[in-house]
Structures are given as C-alpha cells and as structure tokens.
Image (cartoon, rainbow, N blue to C red):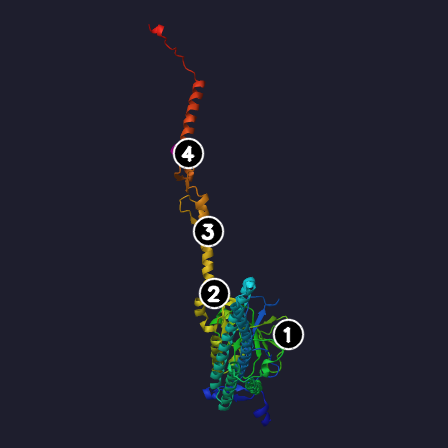
C-alpha cells in the first residue's frame, strides 16, 4: 500500500513541473500525464469543425484542449523543413542550369545570322527560356530564404532549452546543415582544368553529403506523436511533451462572453451539456454534466477517419493552418480541465504559439497566386498588402474599369447621362448639341437647329436659288387661286 501511494497510484499528489518558476501547486499524477488512449495527430497543424446535430441546434459553441509540442520537437521539425527546402534548392539549381544552357545555345544561333525563316519559333523559345530562368531564380531565392529562416528559428528555440547537452546537440544539427550547404555550393562553383580532379572532388563531396544526410536523417525524424493514423489539429492551449486532443465541450447556446475570457478557467454551469474526454484510458466516452443522459460511447475509430457514432454531435475533421488562425482568431476559452493546470505553463505555451504564428512564413493573401512571388511573415502581411505590386496593378485596373463605366453628364448640355467610355462616340455622332458642318455653305451649326439653319441661315447660292424658285412658284400658285381684275393696255388712239 505504501508503494502504491507513493509510486503507482494515479491520484497521488505531486509538485508542479514548474516549481522552479515559482508555482506551488500540488497536482494529481493523472493530471500531469497522458495515457495511450489520447487521440494522436499526424500533422503539426489541423482544424476541428463541429456541426450541430439533431439534438443540439445552433447557435452553440465547443472548446478543445490540445497538448503542445516540446521545444526539442520544434527544433527537429524546423530542421526537417530546412532539409526539404535544401532539396528544392538542389533540384531547382539543376533546372536553372538547363535553362541557362538553352539560353546560351539560342545566343549562338542568333550570332550566326541565319535565322530569317525561323524568327517566329526562336521568339517563342526566347520567351519560354526567359520565363524558365526567372521562375527558377524566384524559387531559389525563396528556398534559400526559407532555409536561412528555419535554421535561425531552430537556433533560437535551441538556445532556450535548459539542458546544455540538448542545446549543444541541436546546435550541431545546424552546423551539419550549414556544412551540407557549403558542399553543394562548392560542387556547383568548382571548375578545375583537369577533368580527373573534378571527378575525384565530386566523388568525395558526394560521400561527405551521404554521411551528412545520414546524420541529419537520424536527427530530424518526426516524433512518434506526429505519425499516428488520424487527422487532427490545435485549438485551446496546454503544454506537454506529446501532442493529442484531450477534451471537447458542447454548449447548447452561443456564448459571446467566451471571446473575452479566453484564458479564464470555467466551472460547471447549467449550460455545460457535457464534455468529450480522451484521457484515463476512457477516451471513447462522453460524460454528461447535467445528468440528462448516461455515459456512453461517442467515437469509433475507422482507419484514418474519426466518426461520431452518438447523437450528441456531428464531427468533421479538416485541416487547420495559419491563414485560418488569422480568420478565426485565438481560442475562445481555456479548457475545463485547465482548472487543474499550471497557469505558468498555459501562459507560456500561449505566448509561444502566438510567436510562431506571427513569425511563420505565409504566402501573399491577396489572391495574387504564384505570380506575386512574395513569401512574408504573418506579422508583416498588413504592410505587404499596401505594397504588393500585383495588388496595386489590380486596383489600378479595377479603378480604370469603373471609371470607364461611370455615368457622366454630357459636356455639351444635352441632359443625357452617358458611360464615360461611350462619351467620344456620343459627342461625335449622337449628341443633339454637337456642332455639325453644313455641306452647302460650309458654316457650323448646332445639330438640333438643322431646320432653322436650312430655312434662315444657309446662304449657299444653290440654296438661295432654290428659295427664290420656291417663292416664285408660290406666287404663281396664289395668283391662279385668287385671280384679280384685268387691266387693258391703253393704245395710242385712246390717248388721243
């Protein structure tokens, strides 16, 4: 019994691991460790989306408690990513060399001067080669920047490890990676006159690279907690040397006050319908806080998928990324089990995660696609939004489009509203106040005064002759319709 109370009982009291930081809490042993029934994650990031079932209608909310990775795991993860980007540098460099060789061959063809009948194909090849060289250089710049950033981040995390032996070992990883980079650069730049000397150098460098790769492969293996066959993600924060989801709580109402108390530990309340736990070897059960339904099985494990087999909730597991963190924000509340957790650990883990999110590399989020070419820190994204060349070009084109389709008043005062892009055509051929040139007299007049000009203002000879003919015709017509008394001509005899 004494041995059980001191060494084997899961409910025995033990001091907090952060006693060196001033924490005086005495916690039960089962609150400090994770049993094998915990849900394991296959990735370092993920998102849990829970939809309301038939029994709990929205609005409602849920909370999650997730274990964080240790610093040693973070260093190994950074190194693994750095090696992957190093491989990208190697493959892209060979592709760049191929494009440069094609460019050299094209220049030699152009210097020969016999390309008159091949101008079109050569122009197409030149454009393709230029795009290939530019794309390879862009990928190389990004990959080298990522390698440098990952190595620097791993060094920063390694320097915070309290155990000197672990810190020295992690620093050795960075040295191996730097040596590997130097060997690759030497293989690319070395061009001795003797081909045999070059062959010996390349053979020796490849052997050294193989030894370095073996050492690095042993150091950057993904931890066992990350290679399990289940999807998963992070939400609320805690701290441990393992990764796993431990608890989900379901609420029958929407709680906006949760956003203002994300770090407060909540106690049992009537609205807390139940919680879904993965600890103490009973992770497949849901505990009812209100006593309305018994404890029953909630989860069934089917290969890599997780299905909700109870009526309590519908569960979908989807990926969770830094971009989604920026949209969803920080976790809403602390976990129900965090009432037994050390506040020092919780606060430190939260600050560490926020630091990783702010300094993580993200692509331009403005919809520029692969043509933007910018991979920036998450904290620098607002500044990048204002300086992105493609964003500004897109805004300029959009503004020009709306400006052309904007309705404006006719400058000639006809009273119509015309789209700006159709304004030249309107002024030239449609506006009633436009000036037109008379094809008879050569004078200008307003289009709406055409009849007045023809009747009163036009003084062309043919127009005047036509008017005189019309007057004479009307006079003759009137004289026929209204005949007057005839006057006899006096003869010379009458006068005498």
Q: Which residue is mark 2?
A: 390
Please name which of the two marks, 4 or 3, marks the residue nearer to the observer. Answer: 4
Q: Which residue is mark 1?
A: 305
* Above or below 428: residue 255: below
**Numbered circle sitting on residue 454:** 4
Q: Nearer the viewer, residue 236 or 460?
A: 460
Q: Is residue 284 located in the magenta-colored stretch of the structure?
A: no
Please name which of the two marks, 1 or 3, marks the residue nearer to the observer. Answer: 3
Q: Closer to the N terminus: mark 4 or mark 3?
A: 3
* Above or below 124: residue 37: below
Q: Quadrant of residue 474?
A: top left
Q: Residue furthest right?
A: 302
The residues tagged by marks 1 and 3 sit, at their Cα atoms, a distance apart of 57 Å
**Magenta portion: prevailing SS class:** helix
Tell me which residue sits at (57%, 72%) in the image.
Answer: 319
Q: Closer to the N terminus: mark 1 or mark 4?
A: 1
Q: Closer to the N terminus: mark 1 or mark 3?
A: 1
Q: Nearer the viewer, residue 171 or 303?
A: 171
Q: Is 295 on the left-hand or right-hand side of 482?
A: right
Q: Which residue is mark 3?
A: 421
């Amino acid at each position: 019994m004494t041995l059980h109370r001191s060494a084997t009982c899961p409910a025995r009291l033990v001091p907090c691991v952060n006693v060196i930081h001033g924490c005086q809490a005495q916690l039960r042993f089962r609150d400090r460790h994770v049993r094998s029934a915990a849900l394991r994650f296959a990735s370092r990031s993920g998102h849990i989306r829970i939809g309301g079932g038939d029994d709990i209608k929205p609005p409602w909310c849920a909370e999650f408690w997730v274990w964080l990775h240790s610093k040693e795991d973070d260093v190994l993860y950074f190194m693994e990513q750095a090696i992957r980007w190093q491989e990208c540098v190697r493959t892209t460099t060979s592709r760049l060399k191929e494009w440069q060789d094609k460019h050299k061959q094209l220049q030699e063809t152009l210097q020969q001067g016999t390309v008159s009948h091949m101008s079109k194909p050569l122009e197409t090849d030149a454009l393709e080669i230029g795009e290939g060289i530019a794309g390879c250089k862009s990928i190389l710049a990004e990959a080298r920047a990522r390698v440098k950033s990952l190595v620097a981040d791993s060094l920063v995390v390694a320097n915070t490890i309290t155990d000197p032996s672990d810190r020295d070992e992690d620093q050795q990883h960075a040295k191996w990676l730097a040596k590997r980079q130097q060997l690759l650069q030497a293989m690319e730049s070395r061009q001795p006159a003797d081909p045999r000397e070059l062959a010996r150098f390349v053979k020796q460098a490849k052997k050294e690279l193989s030894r370095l790769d073996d050492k690095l492969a042993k150091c950057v293996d993904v931890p066992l907690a990350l290679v399990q066959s289940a999807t998963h993600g992070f939400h609320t924060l805690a701290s441990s040397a393992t990764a796993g989801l431990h608890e989900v709580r379901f609420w029958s109402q929407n709680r906006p006050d949760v956003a203002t108390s994300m770090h407060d530990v909540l106690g049992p309340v009537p609205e807390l319908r139940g919680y879904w736990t993965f600890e103490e070897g009973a992770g497949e059960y849901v505990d009812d806080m209100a006593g309305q339904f018994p404890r029953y099985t909630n989860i069934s494990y089917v290969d890599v998928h997780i299905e909700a087999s109870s009526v309590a909730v519908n569960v979908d597991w989807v990926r969770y990324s830094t971009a989604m963190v920026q949209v969803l924000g920080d976790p809403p509340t602390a976990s129900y089990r965090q009432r037994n957790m050390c506040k020092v650990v919780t606060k430190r883990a939260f600050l560490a995660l926020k630091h990783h999110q702010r300094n993580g590399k993200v692509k331009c989020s403005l919809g520029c696609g692969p043509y933007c070419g910018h991979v920036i820190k998450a904290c620098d994204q607002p500044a990048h939004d204002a300086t992105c060349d493609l964003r500004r070009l897109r805004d300029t084109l959009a503004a020009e489009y709306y400006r052309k389709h904007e309705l404006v008043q006719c400058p000639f005062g006809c009273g119509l509203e015309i789209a700006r892009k159709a304004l030249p055509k309107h002024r030239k051929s449609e506006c009633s106040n436009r000036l037109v040139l008379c094809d008879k007299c050569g004078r200008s007049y307003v289009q709406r005064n055409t009849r007045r000009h023809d009747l009163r203002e036009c003084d062309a000879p043919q127009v005047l002759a036509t008017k005189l003919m019309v007057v004479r015709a009307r006079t003759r017509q009137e004289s026929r319709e209204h005949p007057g008394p005839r006057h006899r001509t006096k003869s010379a005899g009458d006068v005498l």
